Image: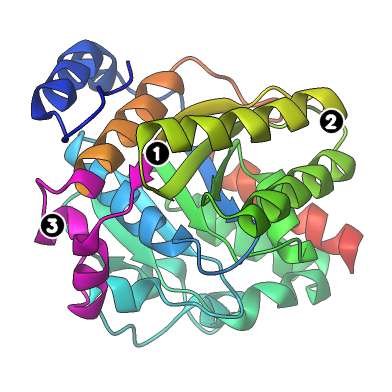
Amino acid sequence: MDRPNGRFDQAWALREAVMSSRQAQSRFRGLRSIAVVSGKGGVGKTNLSVNLALAMGQLGRDVMLMDADMGLANVDLLLGVVPKHHLGHVIGGTMGLEDIVISVNDRVRLIPGGAGFSDLADLDEQSQAMLIERFSAMESQAEVLLVDTGAGIHRNVISFAAAADQVLLLTTTEPTAIRDAYGVLKSLVMGVSWKPNVSLVVNMAMSQEEALSVADRVRMAASQFLDLAIDYVGYVPWDQSVMESVRRRRPFLLEMPDSPAASCVKVIARRLVSGGQDQEAPQGRGLKAFMLRLGRRMRLKS
């Protein structure tokens, strides 16, 4: 259901919640990994990842938010936390995953980022197996692994996208962002032997109509040139409260929960939750399966 034109309709969000309530109560079939990607920086990818994780937590999901942007890891800044350790320490073997995880609230936990993921390709089989087991030990503690990747078509970004059960592609309405979003899709499709499960979100749209127009363009290009069907799961409007929350280092979903942006993110979260209940990953779900695929991709690209 799409919201009506004009001022933000709170009744629309309530109707959406009622329609999705039954679906939101059931459990995922194993941990589901979702990689959030974008074609270029500055489109709000990390902000969406943070607030989407919180929205899923509010729906009763246990979420692990992984900061996998190896160049500009800044999820911690948007959450207002200061990690003492990061993924590099786990990959380096000096710490366990449980030693670096930060509890954001009862439902959401952060795996702080670091440059260490690029070292996956250099690990021998025994070291990589030990790392995968460290991640597997956390398997029962989350239902969703939400991965905030870097921007662009860097090989590491594509590796995370290919390893995940689902890809959430973010673009704005700017022509350069749309073009680069298609570039990510093309790189992903060319890099895997299966049809990836991709959903689309349009950010910073001035209206529902503008967002739908952009979504139609991306979906049409993907269908025509890549033979890929994309699910449009919603948009986030341009909202001054988003910028204000960034300056305060507090997610807008918590700082201004009734804002248009927060309400739309909640809708996107419900759609992702309800839409993923019965989906089975082609190569198996779970944190261990995700790490196995990621390690394999990293080795292939090294």
Quickly name the residue at label 1. 235
How far is disc 2 from disc 3 in space, using C-alphas? 38 Å
Q: Which residues are magenta?
A: 235-261
Q: Secondary structure at mark 1?
A: strand
Quickly name the residue at label 3. 254
Amino acid beneath label 3? Leu
Residue extending farthest front: 6
User: Can residue 142 be seen from the camera position used here?
Assistant: no
- Look at discs 3 and 1 and give the one toward the viewer: 1
Amino acid beneath label 2? Leu
- Look at discs 2 and 3 and give the one toward the viewer: 2
Q: Quadrant of residue 149?
A: bottom right
Marks 2/1 in contact by CB < 8 Å: the verdict is no
Q: How many marks?
A: 3
Position in image of residue 189 (x %, y %) = 82, 38
Q: Residue at x 32, y 79 (%)?
A: 77
In the depicted structure, whether residue 107 falls above or below residue 213: below
How far is disc 3 from disc 1 in space, using C-alphas? 19 Å
Amino acid beneath label 1? Tyr
**N-terminal-most mark, 2 or 1:** 2
**N-terminal-most mark, 3 or 1:** 1
